Image: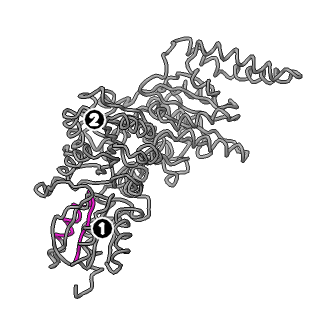
Amino acid sequence: MSGYLDRINEANDIKNIEPEAYEALAEEIRSFIIHSVSENGGHLASNLGVVELTMALHLCLDFPNDKLIWDVGHQSYTHKLLTGRKADFSGLRTFGGMSGFPKHKESPCDAFDTGHSSTSISAALGYARARDLKGENRTVVAVIGDGSMTGGMAYEALNNVSRLKSNMIIVLNDNKMSISENVGGLSRHLTALRTRESYLDFKIDVEKRLKQIPHVGDSVARSVKKSKDSIRQLLVKGGFFEDFGIKYIGPVDGHDIREMVRVINALKRLNEPVVMHVVTQKGRGYEPAEKNPAAFHGVGSFDIDTGAPLAGKSVSYTSVFSRTICRMAKEHEDIVAVCAAMPDGTGLSAFSKHFPNRFYDVGIAEQHAVTFAAGLAAAGMKPFVAIYSSFLQRAYDQIIHDVCIQNLPVVFCVDRAGLVGADGETHQGIFDLSYLSMIPNMTVCAPKNKYEFYDMLHFAYRYQGPIAIRYPRGEAYDGYKNKRSPIVYGKSELLFEGEKVALLALGSMVKTALEVREKLLTMGIEATVVNGRFAAPLDKDCLERLCTGHKMIVTLEENILKGGFGEACADYLLEKKPDVRLIHIGVPDVYVEHGGVEQLKKTLRMDADSVTERILAALSPDE
């Protein structure tokens, strides 16, 4: 190692690195990222692909005055290194450590907190408008991948960017597929020509002089520009963006630092928005990630030599869903599956191979996914829509307006529901119980273990209305296989009958409730344990029965307390049984940062030890 990375201790230090050392620095950065992610996990392929691009941007921009906004933000590791956070990588994505996404509270060089896709152009436009209104002098850059360009919000933003009369740079990071066919040398020649300083000076001067011609100047300038643009669109890709009124430059080699620096410095001088199309390779510099970038998108710890994960693979809820939906589709030809750019993450890759004509990946377009599924259901199909809990938030209007008002039989498979851990605030699935349960016609349920999940998927197929099944990330609970009673609509399941304390748990928290019961038994308290199964509708008969013979009812959910399962139970009981004592276990009114799920539960006082302590503290001595 040459130690170039050691010379970067704060923002803008890269400008002190000799140009002939850029390639060596890029290799150091790649090696550092590979070793860091191999220990703590994280997003690998996307970060390896943007090393040179990030270096070029840092060579051209002045931080933190200039603003760089990363779409999604999972590719910002090099940016963090170049802004002096190398020492923080030992705690990457761990509790109390550095986030895997941009965080303004972590550094003023992180202009905007991101985690979901297709937001960068909108945020950058906001920065550009504010800059102009305040008379500031700064460059604003948004970096967005070709995948994020499948999200409709990006086009809403482009439509408004076209009205901007000042500089803003949109870097389109094309790491998977070209927007249109390359035209080879001619495109590169025209790109080089249009970004030369002499050309830009000449262009600006000509337009200024034309506009000075009395009476007809503006009209002549527009005509010349229109003719020139029409000819250019025959020769150069980018007509799509230029139809929006946004200048297009590219494609540019996203691994040629000197060329990108030249282009970016030229584009900074334009007094209009511009798209810079760069072509990069996901996973570059690490052979396993180059060969299979999807597998190295988000990874746990792994062996660097082989790329193999260090932890043994367990059976996850996602894999249970994958196997079950494939089996069901063999029996029922009306089953179709929909996802939003996450066939691997949601477990639908196997379905896509077995039933390609019944699988639809709509891209990063959750709103479209839901309304598309509503159309499928209205036409007589049975759509299963698999989307992560935090991403489903983006389609809330469509769930209400297009599915639930019409009472259409769409099955929402809400993956990553509850605490997801290392990805932090933007990915924690802690709101879905609240935002789904309040919708009329929507049924919401959650399985206690992998066997009940299997049964719920079959139940959902038979159910003739909107239904959401929420299930957590990670290993599927294997306990209580023999406690498997048929699922009845809106009814809970009694697991253990006791007295004094009733534990009413939903989904993943049933396991915690069973652990609490064991702890209470050692203290002579035999608690009742109920698997709630349904958050909507509530099992009101069960609630009333629990009020008889119990001093206290404890609700447990892996969801924010406001508007959640516990509050719904309390609303009913306070009207019917105002004397009952209630304890609600769930996520308090906070955004939960990154860290291991068990550590987060302990911090939030949702683990078995904390719940037991809270129960004992609430019981009077004679109870």
Quadrant for the N terminus, please: top left
What is the C-alpha distance between the residues marked 2 and 1? 35 Å
Pick whichever, 248 or 413, lies toward us: 413
Q: Is residue 475 above or below residue 265?
A: below
Q: Position of residue 36 (x, y in %)?
A: 35, 44
Q: Is residue 72 left or right of residue 377?
A: right
Name the residue rendered at 64%, 12% in the picture: 231
Highlighted magenta segment, given as a residue range:
500-518
What residue is at 32 percent from the left and 48 percent from the top? 467
Residue annotated with mark 1: 555
- Using a 10 Å C-alpha cutoff, classify the residue at mark 1 as few (fewer than 14 neighbours), some (14 to 19) or many (20 or more): many
- Between 563 and 205, the one nearer to me in the picture: 563
| 317 left or right, relative to 257 | left
Residue type at mark 2 is Ile
Indicate whether 504 appears above or below 231.
below
Tell me the number on the disc at residue 335: 2
Tag 2 near tag 1, CB within 8 Å: no
Q: Residue furthest left?
A: 482
Q: Residues within 10 Å of mark 2 (few under 14, many from 20)?
A: many
Q: Secondary structure at mark 2?
A: strand
x then y, percent, for residue 395: 45, 44
Q: Is residue 298 left or right of 396 when viewed as pictured?
A: left
x and y percent of residue 51 in the render? 45, 34
* In the foreground, 150 or 499: 499
Label 1 element class: strand
Give amino acid for label 1: Thr
Q: Is residue 29 visible?
A: no
Tell whether position 506 is magenta: yes
In percent of the image, x 30 and y 45: which residue is there? Answer: 464
Which residue is painted at 31% across and 28% down in the image?
287
Quick check: can you spot residue 140?
Answer: yes
